[in-house]
Amino acid sequence: MNRGERLVIVGGGPAGLATARAYRNNGGLAGVTILSAEPYAPYNRPPLTKDFLRGESGRESLPIEAGAWYADNGVELRLSTAVESLDRERAVVETDAGEQFSFDACVLATGSEPVRIPVPGADDPEILVMRTLENSARLRGRVGEGDRAVVVGSGFIGCEAAASLSLRGASVTLVSLEEVPQAERLGGEVGGRIKGWLEGYGVDLRLGTGLEGIERRNGGYSVAVEGGEAIPAGTVLFGTGVKPRLELAEGAGLELDGGVVADSSMRTSAPGVFAVGDIVSAYNESAGRHVSVEHWGDALEHGRVAGTVIAGGEAAWGMAPGFWSTIGERTLKYWAWDGGWDELAFEDRGDSFVVRYGKDGVLVGVLAHGADEDYENGRAPIERGDPFPG
Ligand SMILES: Cc1cc2nc3c(=O)[nH]c(=O)nc-3n(C[C@H](O)[C@H](O)[C@H](O)COP(=O)(O)OP(=O)(O)OC[C@H]3O[C@@H](n4cnc5c(N)ncnc54)[C@H](O)[C@@H]3O)c2cc1C
């Protein structure tokens, strides 16, 4: 792309921002516009269930780049601007206010949105979800010392939020269908550790328990769970998963397969249109297949690849996906492909542990708690496809 042309990025999360950053860092001279539905410049989401929720850090620590970065790098940032359609033929995106932006290259980086499980009462807007700064600020404002909260779901969001709210002095009940948190994803041993950590933080666990419905009661809620119990709560938070925002890509007729299908340079089926972050199912050179992940570091890496390629450089996605989760003061770090595992080796080292995951005799994941060296050395063997257990 040349001076006088325009790169339009739809979505102001880490993937969109990293695209703009890499485009400029690789000498791209075209005009760059980021259109973001949110009212804030791109910010860090991971602290929203961790230190920010606990009140240990404030809003000022959240922005990914300082305010001046956008002007200094010639990146126009349009906030509170939701794109409603992408017209491939005319190479134009249109916002919900009817404003049109024509492009020479377009990057879709629309991320994911939380889903609520469909039980009676779940659509009450006062029942909270967790994705944005506003979601976290609202939860933090509502749940403090002595308050009662119910968290639904024992994935990373649910476990992190439950531990953080408990550390704020709240009385927290976590309700989940899983018998052991994240056992299917990470194995029973890791799940057992997570369970122990949550109990240690004082979280009251209702595992293997379905949610039946939520009713407003006495200025708060009554949360009905299997077995006839009704748990009273001032606040209810759903941590019940996300779905990628694919409407724009779908409306534009891009090839989809659970996510927007892209090659390892993040090019979609439409010339000049790229996709990055949570919405993409991109070809990973090391895996030798398309991979979908919802991780912070991979969103940044996708953006790096797309921005470099659009600037005329060479880059391809080949990194193994990686994720960190901090539950209270306990951090898990792992690399893993998205296709699951069929065997694991758990190495207990007392205060720390390392888990290696295998599938069809090949190493597909490494998880470490308190063992940073094993985590750091874990990525390359996964990318090479070393034999399990390595
Ligand atoms: C509370 C929380 C904690 C997390 N913690 C971790 C962690 O510890 N480690 C980890 O690896 N991952 C973590 N994640 C996941 C990680 O944040 C996501 O994988 C990452 O944010 C995805 O980046 P993205 O740029 O694809 O999308 P998003 O961050 O979702 O950003 C998408 C942006 O696009 C905007 N947008 C959407 N549609 C439109 C439209 N039509 N027009 C204009 N703008 C639009 C959205 O408003 C949003 O600003 C966490 C997520 C949450 C919510």
Image: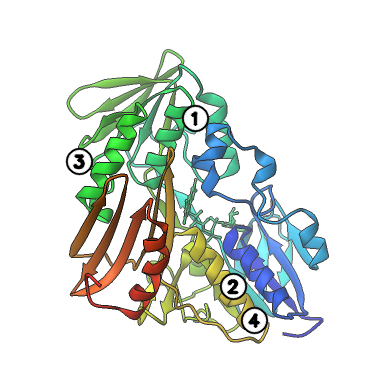
Which quadrant: the N terminus?
bottom right
The 10 Å Cα crowd at callout 3, few under 14, some 14 to 19, many 20 or more, is some
Q: Is residue 166 left or right of residue 297?
A: left
**Front in this rendered view, residue 199 or 307:** 199
- The image quarter containing residue 13 is bottom right
| Label 3 to label 4: alpha-carbon separation | 46 Å
* Residue 29 point in image, percent of width and height: 78, 80
Q: Circle 2 sits on which residue?
A: 304
* Residue 324 point in image, percent of width and height: 44, 54
* Foreground: disc 1 or disc 2: 2
Q: Circle 1 sits on which residue?
A: 126
| Amino acid type shown at disc 3 | Glu
The 10 Å Cα crowd at callout 1, few under 14, some 14 to 19, many 20 or more, is few
| Label 4 to label 2: alpha-carbon separation | 10 Å
| Amino acid type shown at disc 2 | Arg
| Amino acid type shown at disc 1 | Glu
Which quadrant: the C terminus?
bottom left
The reply to whether dot 4 and dot 2 touch (C-beta < 8 Å) is no
Question: Between disc 4 and disc 2, whose residue precedes?
Answer: 2
What's the residue at 24%, 51% (across, down)? Answer: 348
**Front in this rendered view, residue 362 or 234:** 362
Question: Between disc 4 and disc 1, whose residue precedes?
Answer: 1
Residue behind label 3 places its C-beta within 8 angstroms of ligand 1: no
Question: Between disc 1 and disc 2, whose residue precedes?
Answer: 1
What's the residue at 42%, 12% (across, down)? Answer: 218
| Label 3 to label 1: alpha-carbon separation | 28 Å
* Foreground: disc 3 or disc 4: 3
Q: Is residue 114 left or right of residue 20?
A: left
| Amino acid type shown at disc 4 | Ile
